[in-house]
Image (tube, grey):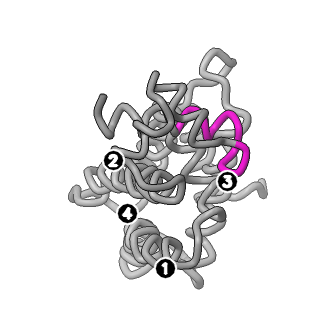
């Protein structure tokens, strides 16, 4: 039994029951451990939550950094970042759900440790928007608001997207990028 096994199981349990509904007993049961044995690997549910949030942000940052570090025009880079982000969410739905919807359950100390990590991730998105604005590709007067709006749209996808549905995640990403770039006006 590894810490990664425990975190994988915890992500699934927390996704299903929510952070406050999930117990350490539920997590222990999911990995076939006695509750007391679980405490040999982790000290608390808060520790598990923070580890899951860090793991989720690290995974997303890795996916997005691969694209953001490429020498591409800002609009193409942003389009590819949107696709990479949505693909990562779809491929890691347990972890992504915990990251996106359970961060509010962090205690104050853990939240303070989490925020700079989250801000670094959001900085990747602000950087590409700023790059596009400087080069004249984008007209973006408030990159922070734009990033938060884009994150809201993409993050909510996790609640309704069905991999067996009529659109692939790539098609959803393209439509989001088109909507962002072209708006809705004719």
Query: Which label belongs to residue 63?
Result: 2
Closer to viewer: mark 3 or mark 4: 3
Give the mark, 3 or 4, whose residue is nearer the N terminus: 4
- Give the magenta range: 11-21
- Specify few, some or many for label 2: CA neighbours under 10 Å numbering under 14, 14-19, or 20 or more: some
Determine contact: label 1, label 4, CB under 8 Å.
no
Q: CA distance from mark 1 to mark 3?
A: 25 Å
Q: Earlier in the sequence, mark 1 or mark 3?
A: 1
- The residue under label 1 is 112
Residue 88 x %, y % = 44, 39
Residue at 52%, 39% (x, y): give it: 11
The residue lying at 43 percent from left, 75 percent from top is 113
Q: Secondary structure at mark 1?
A: helix
Front in this rendered view, residue 71 or 120: 120
* Label 1 vs 4, first from the N-terminus: 4
Up-down: is 94 above or below 135? above
Circle 4 residue: 74
Q: CA distance from mark 2 to mark 3?
A: 18 Å
Residue annotated with mark 3:
153
172 relative to 107, above or below: above
Where residue 182 appears, x then y in whole percent? 64, 57
Helix, strand or loop at label 3? It is: helix
Residue 54 is drawn in which quadrant?
Answer: bottom left
The first of marks 2 and 3 along the sequence is: 2
Residue found at x 39% / y 70%: 117
Nearer the observer: mark 2 or 1; the answer is 1
What predominant SS class does the magenta segment belong to?
helix
């Amino acid at each position: 039994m590894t810490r990664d096994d425990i975190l994988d199981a915890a992500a699934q349990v927390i996704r299903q029951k929510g952070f406050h509904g999930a117990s350490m007993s539920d997590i222990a049961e999911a990995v076939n451990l006695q509750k007391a044995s679980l405490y040999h690997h982790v000290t608390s549910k808060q520790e598990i939550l923070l580890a899951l949030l860090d793991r989720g942000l690290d995974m997303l940052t890795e996916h997005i950094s691969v694209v953001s570090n490429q020498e591409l025009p800002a609009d193409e880079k942003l389009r590819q970042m949107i696709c990479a982000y949505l693909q990562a969410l779809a491929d890691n739905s347990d972890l992504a759900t915990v990251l996106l919807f359970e961060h509010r359950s962090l205690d104050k100390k853990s939240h303070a440790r989490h925020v700079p990590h989250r801000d670094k991730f959001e900085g990747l998105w602000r950087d590409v928007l700023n790059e596009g604005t400087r080069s004249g590709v984008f007209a973006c007067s408030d990159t922070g608001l734009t990033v938060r709006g884009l994150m809201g749209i993409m993050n909510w996808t996790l609640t309704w997207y069905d991999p067996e549905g009529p659109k692939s995640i790539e098609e959803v990403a393209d439509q989001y990028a088109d909507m962002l770039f072209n708006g809705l006006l004719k």
